[in-house]
Amino acid sequence: MHTLQELFNLDGKTALITGGSRGLGLQMAEALGEQGARLVITSRKQAELDQAVAHLKQRGIEVLAVASDLSKESAVAPLVDAALKQLGHIDILINNAGATWGAPAEDHPLEAWDKVMNLNVRSLFLLSQAVGKQSMIPRRYGRIVNIASIAGLSGNGPEMQTLAYNTSKAAVINFTRALAGEWGKYGITVNALAPGFFPSKMSRGLLEKMGDAAAQRAPLRRLGDDEDLKGAVLLFATDAGKHITGQTLAVDGGVSSVTI
């Protein structure tokens, strides 16, 4: 029988976190690292990665950064190779890298649709496949956490105009269910987090447009902060959640409970 502290402990575990240089990705990197995991974080911009590494190391977290543009298929194999070289194996994969695009559906550019789908869905499939084949399946252990969104749980009002983003995040949710069903026999859990409104570079323009309305839509009457994903990601990434798979947890202040 394990204690609660032991169930949430990640000493000796390793994690690869995409989009880990800022925002929600950095918050989740902090959570995993603070519980003892060794990390590899990745994003496109080396300067942002350098800042994130310095921040995490100040907190006593062992971390390596690898710059990688996961919208390109050719970036996946080198990233996995670099992570495996550094970590030896990958216990936890956090698929957080993502993109959005705002445009009316009737005028949505095809290249923008492809950009969102390639990063939010295609790269998630390719990275999960590579990490699964090279590390998790052979070791019969893995924790995959996909970052979806409450935008994947419902449609939009006319002010949102994020058709590709919503569609991609709905795909992430069903990808999570399907992969969980297929890889459970290998001891791999696959779950998703669906954040609501958190202040971030990606959401800045929309939050400025919505003003206080974004917070007021939530029963808790606030936006997510720089701690609100930590407990949720640890549940899915540790043995505390070892009997949970194929699930999507909304972390949104209650927005989805009153709008879906």
Image (spheres, rainbow, N blue to C red):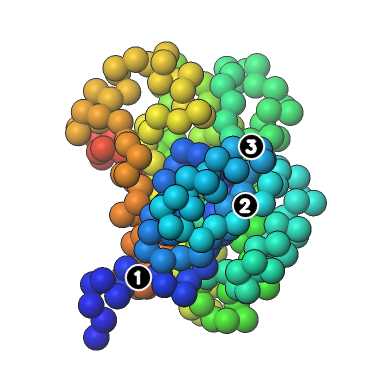
Q: Say which residue label 1 marks.
A: 9
The residue lying at 75 percent from left, 45 percent from top is 72
Q: Is residue 189 left or right of residue 98?
A: left
Any mark on residue 47, and which? Answer: 3
Q: Secondary structure at mark 3?
A: helix
124 or 54: nearer the viewer? 54
State which tag comes first along the sequence, 1 or 3. 1
Residue at position x 37%, y 16% from top?
210
Q: Residues within 10 Å of mark 3 (few under 14, many from 20)?
A: few
Query: Dot 1: within a 10 Å radius of its alpha carbon, few (fewer than 14), some, or many (20 or more) residues?
Result: many
Within the image, what quadrant is residue 137 found in?
bottom right
Residue to which mark 2 is pinned: 65
Residue 221 versus residue 26 in the image, above or below? above
Q: Residue furthest right?
A: 74
Q: Is residue 236 visible?
A: no
Q: Are marks 2 and 1 in contact (CB under 8 Å)?
A: no
Which label lies toward us, 2 or 1?
2
Determine whether 206 is above or below 155 in the image.
above
Secondary structure of the residue carrying numbered label 1: loop
- Foreground residue among 17 and 151: 17
Dot 2 crowding, Cα within 10 Å, few <14, some 14–19, many 20+: many
